[in-house]
Amino acid sequence: MATDVTMPRLSDSMEEGTILKWIVEEGGEVKRGEPLVEIETDKANMTYEADTSGTLIEVVAGEGDTLPIGDVIARIGEEGEKPSGKSDEEDTGDEEEAAGEDSEPDADGDGAGDDDKAAEAEAKAEEAKAKAKEAQRALDGGGAAGNGGGDERVKASPVARRMARDMGVELARLEGSGPGGRIVKADIEAAAKGDGAPAKEAEPAEDGGAPEDGAPRETPAPKEERKAVESGAKGEVETQELSRIQRTVSRRMAESKATAPDYTLHMDVDMSLCVELRKRLKEVEDPAPSFNDMVVKACANALREHPRVNGAYRDGHFELYSAVNVGVAVAAQDTLVVPTIHDADKKSLGEIARQARELIEKVRDGKITPPELSGGTFTVSNLGMYGVDSFSAVINPPQAALLTVGALKKRAAVDDGGRVIARDQMTLSLVCDHRILYGADGAEFLARVRELLEQPLALAL
């Protein structure tokens, strides 16, 4: 009996995933624990390993398809076995025909199934029929359905069908680039930019008259003229599509700024003893812990003493976490990834340094795993290596706060005797969600981090 392979949850915030590449082709042998498919999630590109052995008897989701968690993407069975269920293409390809039938055989061919399944199927068919008619009316400018819903019988992925309806692209006119000539997301995007422009802009009504509402119809400018106007003084315009990771980062950061009333506290830290400590550690271990590793350790110790900073605000209540998991913001290719050092308060400075180096290397090699990106309760972001003295950042929701680290520089300072001397200093900035952290709460936490860094031997305890 065939086993369904569903879209897995590869990160704690993942809602849907995009199939990037099938590592095993349809009809190929699948071994449990070996790579099956590469999936783009909201945090990184992940390789999903098969959880059962057999033969890949059916690929339901083609490369480029985006599906929510839990949807079937493939089926694994015995060699020579035929798929027992319908694919997404079959489900969506005959929506109009299914809507006009009173019943439909089930997977075993013994009739319509029980009453609940029949009622559910009928409701879905009616909804699909209504959407198809609405989309067709939009394409025809409100007139009669011209092609009788022919797009619904074209071989295309569910995502491609939805995008075609939204963007006014006629599927029947396209040649698919997916497996077996299947139309995928990339084909719709290409058609929308070229010959597949939305029908409501592409041609006037056949009678050359005004629209049904009586408003005068604007004659669209030729494509070349529109392109020249759009370019203008800016020169040629190049449009770049966002990856799933970039879209997720954009959405989450926008939600954070829109919902969290944040404020930022700045504090200068004398890092002279940290500089001296690192020189001594280099004699013992190379590479020695970085200054950022020291900041992470100081934050972890301070978070243990200030549990609300290690918490979150959710729907009118506070969540306080027992585990101290510090995320380290890493600049990956065209995006930002935050791997997590779990139980950082229980790890030594050396352990934090080694794990941080390993995580950063995995991010840049594209080998980071879902568990290593999950469970963060606090984030440290460092731009000091670029010469940035101080900066504010966007809180990583739903965390209560985020610490930013500026450049370590020699600055003028006044000692106890009133003399001006050069000291190694660094500016830390704490961005707080005011719904859970008031000014005094944030200030006390930041002062404790400074105290630990200015007496760094405490970090080794």
Image (spheres, helix red, strand yellow):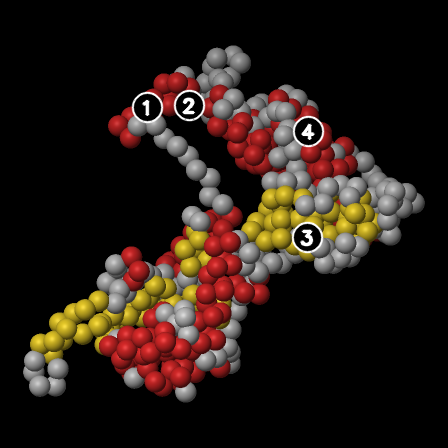
Q: Is residue 236 left or right of residue 173?
A: left
- In this figure, which residue is indicated by the disc labeled 1? 229
Q: Return the residue found at the far top.
A: 207
Label 3 or label 2, whichever comes before in sequence order: 3
Q: Is residue 26 left or right of residue 260?
A: right
**Residue depicted at 54% across the width and 27% down the height:** 191
Q: Dots 3 and 2: beta carbons under 8 Å?
A: no
Label 1 or label 4, whichever comes before in sequence order: 4
**Residue depicted at 36% across the width and 30% down the height:** 237
Do we see residue 436 in this rendering? no
Task: Give the image quarter of residue 110.
Answer: top right
Label 2 or label 1, whichever comes before in sequence order: 2
Residue 346 place in picture, x, y as percent:
49, 82
- In this figure, which residue is indicated by the disc labeled 3? 35
Q: Which mark is residue 181?
A: 4
**Residue depicted at 42% across the width and 23% down the height:** 215
Label 1 or label 3, whichever comes before in sequence order: 3
Task: Give the image quarter of residue 255.
Answer: bottom left
- In this figure, which residue is indicated by the disc labeled 2? 215
Label 4 or label 3, whichever comes before in sequence order: 3
Q: Looking at the image, is mark 2 or mark 4 nearer the viewer?
A: 4
Q: Amino acid at mark 1?
A: Val
**What's the distance in space between the residues labelled 1 and 3, CA to CA?**
49 Å
Do we see residue 29 in this rendering? yes
Q: Amino acid at mark 3?
A: Pro
Observer-nearest of 368 and 403: 368
Q: Amino acid at mark 2?
A: Ala
Q: Residues within 10 Å of mark 4 (few under 14, many from 20)?
A: few
Q: Amino acid at mark 4?
A: Gly
Task: Give the image quarter of residue 264.
Answer: bottom left
Q: Looking at the image, is mark 1 or mark 3 nearer the viewer?
A: 3
